[in-house]
Image (spheres, grey):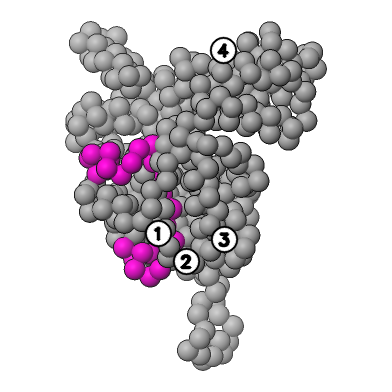
Amino acid sequence: MWEVCLEQIRQKVSPTQYTSFFAPITVSSYDKKELLLVLQVPSRNHAGYLENSFMPLLKEVIIPVFGRVKLQYKVPAQPQGAANESSAEEKEEPIPIATNLYPEYTFARFVEGEANKLARSIGQAIAEHPRSTKFNPLFIYGPSGCGKTHLITAIGLEAVARYPKMKVLYVGAREFQRQFVDATIENKQPDFIRFYQQFNLLIVDDVEEWESSPKTSEAFFHIFNHLFMNGRRIILAADRTPAELKNMDQRMISRFLCGVLAELEKPNHQLCVDILNAKIRRDGLSIPNNVVEYIAHHANGSVRDLEGVINSLLAFSMMGTGEIDMSLAERVCKQVKPEKIGKYDINDILDGVSDHFNIPVDDIIGKSRKAEIANARQIAMYLSAKMAHAQTSRIGRFIGGRDHSTVKHSIDKVKAHIEEDKSFAREIKAIEKEIKA
């Protein structure tokens, strides 16, 4: 039964996460009458990390197989006499922690241009000397699709390559928020904060997500202070400057401003062409110059759109549909226009619903059963399915770790309400327009 769970987990996490955190787990015992499942894990730290980071996933895969069991952990007993062996220097061996860094986002693949030259230089200096407190924190900002995630990931990868024993972690602001909500529900906030305080280099992406989440921002405030005071490196990324994060705690903004700000501008046409040519060479494609120019113009300064077009063209070429010419490029480019269906993600929907009802995202993805919060949560699930084309299991993971049946019930309930109540239907339309605006 546990092998069935592991196979599902393998499909939902990265290979590194699976190898580090799930492959070592075995079932110690399973009591069907008592509804108790005991998993054997390598250490107490391992159990704590599972609780903080993967509890929604564990519930999602365990419940269909074992039922709604109580989950406990068992740590192997120490060898006889080990407890008497003590030394001032001895510490429990820490478990390996996945960095969550995208391995392909290296400095070698980061194409330099006027729009990113300064930010790249600062990032390279930090990556070479991550233990230095100079430029701490580094706050990188710029519009969506300009390469922020690539740059901050490259810093982390370079630091790990130079200093393999450094504890480095990349986390998206929304994922951090979800973990914090889960820790709050389980009354494990201190463990959550201690987990994040252990890193030598902490990289947080999309921190603008916390504008409507004061509790999450406060939790990060304590983590930030600990890391900063102990000379640990902090790297942050957002779509605007700290001063423009109007709804965030001013104490947190002051911390963001105490280091160095580096802007990533929207790539100009020439940089887009250079990025395209670099990717074309790596992928072994042959694309005429006039087609490259057309794609660069169409992308309108979005590195993400450039990559999407090239990946689609690569897929077409692998299927043997003919040469990559202007006609094919035009067809593919239509798929990445700003007005494309499904361009919105669950984060967009959560923010839009939060703004419309003036309810913090923390509450929407939390466990509160207050009518107004439950209503906002169900609408967020419905719009996530409609606008982001997300599967119910993915929606559930984003919105508080709920199972797919709960999400499906919420979606069906909102659909029925729309059909029965014209004023409610108009309100849903209004929320959609606000998200699209």
- Mark drawn on residue 132: 2
Q: Is residue 189 magenta?
A: no
| Residue 209: quarter of image | top left
Quadrant of the drawing holding the C terminus: top left
Task: Tell us which disc is closer to us: 4 or 1.
Answer: 1
- Mark drawn on residue 136: 1
Could one spot residue 270 in this view of the protein? yes
What amino acid type should be assigned to the residue bearing mark 3? Glu
Residue range in magenta is: 225-248
* Element assignment for label 4: helix
At x 38% / y 64%, what residue is drawn? 227
Residue 218 x/y as whole percent: 26, 53
Mark 4 residue crowding within 10 angstroms, few (<14) / some (14–19) / many (20+) = few
At x 59% / y 83%, what residue is drawn? 79
* Element assignment for label 2: loop
Mark 1 residue crowding within 10 angstroms, few (<14) / some (14–19) / many (20+) = many
Residue 274 x/y as whole percent: 64, 31
Image label count:
4
Where 13 sits versus 193, above or below?
A: above
Label whose residue precedes the other's in the sequence (3 or 4): 3
CA distance separating discs 3 and 4: 41 Å
Q: Is residue 233 magenta?
A: yes
At x 24% / y 29%, what residue is drawn? 355
On the picture, is 140 further left or further right than 99? left
What amino acid type should be assigned to the residue bearing mark 2? Ser
At x 63% / y 55%, what residue is drawn? 19
| Residue 284: quarter of image | top right
Task: Tell us which disc is closer to us: 3 or 4.
Answer: 3
Does the CB distance between marks 3 and 4 fall below 8 Å?
A: no
Residue position for label 3: 128
CA distance separating discs 1 and 2: 8 Å
Does the CB distance between marks 1 and 2 fall below 8 Å?
A: yes
